Amino acid sequence: MGAGLELFAQRKDDVEIAVDISLTPIQRGLETLMIVVMRLRTADLAPGTRAGSASP
């Protein structure tokens, strides 16, 4: 999505989390499809927390 961009997603509990997003175009005949991968940046989590848990 662009080098050096800080991207965030918002969870259902309104907590913002840092994410990485990758976009890959796939050519299929005359169509162009996009594969989108969104990953949680786990390096930004506090020690001892899990990705799915709410912040204290």
Image: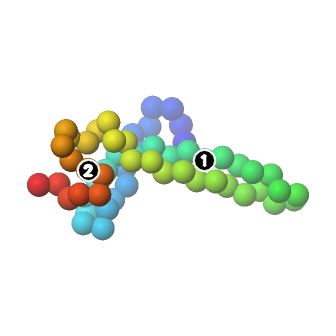
Q: Which mark is residue 11?
A: none
Please report the residue visible at 37 percent of the width from the left and 42 percent of the height from the top.
41
Q: Estimate the x, y position of residue 47 in percent, counting from the top left.
A: 19, 39
Image quadrant containing the N terminus: top right
Image quadrant containing the C terminus: bottom left
Please report the residue visible at 51 percent of the width from the left and 32 percent of the height from the top.
3
> Closer to us: mark 1 or mark 2?
2
**Sequence-first tag of 1 and 2:** 1
Label 2 SS: loop
Please report the residue visible at 50 percent of the width from the left and 46 percent of the height from the top.
21
Counting every numbered tag in the picture gives 2
Q: Estimate the x, y position of residue 16 in percent, counting from the top left.
A: 29, 54
User: What amino acid is labelled 2 in the image?
Assistant: Arg
Tell me: residue 10, above or below residue 38: below
Residue at numbered disc 2: 50
For disc 1, the neighbor class at 10 Å (few under 14, some 14 to 19, many from 20) is: few
Q: Estimate the x, y position of residue 51 in percent, counting from the top left.
A: 30, 52
For disc 2, the neighbor class at 10 Å (few under 14, some 14 to 19, many from 20) is: few
Instruction: Give yes or no for contact between labels 1 and 2 (Cβ–Cβ under 8 Å).
Output: no
Tell me: residue 54, above or below residue 4: below
**With 34 as the anchor, is 50 left or right in this view?**
left
Please report the residue visible at 23 percent of the width from the left and 57 percent of the height from the top.
53
Residue at numbered disc 1: 23
Between the C-alphas of marks 1 and 2, the distance is 26 Å
**With 53 as the anchor, is 29 left or right in this view?**
right
- Furthest toward the top, the residue is 4
User: What amino acid is labelled 1 in the image?
Assistant: Leu
